[in-house]
Amino acid sequence: MIRTLVVDDHTMVRAGLCRLLDAEEDLEVVGQSGSGREAVQLARELKPDVVILDYSLPDIDGLETTRQIVALNMGIRILILTMYANEEYATRVIRAGAAGFIVKVAATDELLAAVRKVARKGVYVSPAIMEKMVGRMGQSHEEVPEAVLSDREMQVLIQLAKGSTSREVSKALSLSLSTVETYRSRILEKLNLRNNSDMTRFAIRRGLIDPE
């Protein structure tokens, strides 16, 4: 039996995932959560085989949640499930220790196959994302500008691009306000942007956030 923990802040999506998994004879949902911090706590307590983790969460994102679960050293496999078909996100979470990355538009059979594959110590990436990841190997930083950002800079960029203030980012990422401002300055310099509005336009253009 593959024991799963489902993490998604949308209640209906989470409920649908739980029903789908529980309907399979070899899969069992042992817990569910709508936040990254609670997911880490539940992973420690419940010791699931696989965590199905939404990338966008209201407190800490999928990248940070992945890092913290991997740091538990419990052999828990993490499958990122996201609406963002973005190879930059996939590259970073897999580098952080995730075992898979699948988009929410994937067919039910693909999701179930992905869960089983990562549970067997395999790695699963949606074919369309894998194609993009392979295709960008020969690309320069000019073609993939966000690649120059560190993981933390990327997190700050996304938060600011979504309209959060530096103080809100400070609280969400457990960073001092001055540290957030330092990251903000580095991001603007590295990407040759002028202000937060430019960050928002950049993030939308690069498919890092949804246009409002």
Image (cartoon, helix red, strand yellow):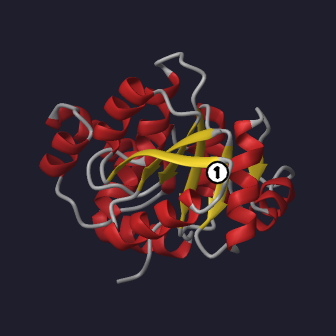
Residue positioned 41% across, 63% down in the render:
14
Residue 199, horizontal then vertical, whole percent? 38, 64
Residue positioned 54% across, 18% down in the render:
74
Circle count: 1
Quarter of the image for residue 106 reads bottom right
Residue positioned 48% across, 42% down in the render:
63
Residue 82, horizontal then vertical, whole percent? 54, 62
Examine the rendered structure and indicate whether residue 156 appears above or below residue 175. Answer: below
Examine the rendered structure and indicate whether residue 195 appears above or below residue 67. Answer: below
Q: Quadrant of the N terminus?
A: top right
Mark 1 secondary-structure assignment: helix
Of the pair 10 and 96, the residue shown nearer to us: 10
Quarter of the image for residue 111 reads bottom right
Residue 132, horizontal then vertical, whole percent? 79, 62
Residue position for label 1: 90
Of the pair 185 and 166, the residue shown nearer to us: 166
- Would residue 180 be found to the left or right of residue 67 on screen? left
Q: Residue furthest bottom?
A: 212
Q: Quadrant of the C terminus?
A: bottom left
Residue 88, horizontal then vertical, whole percent? 63, 53
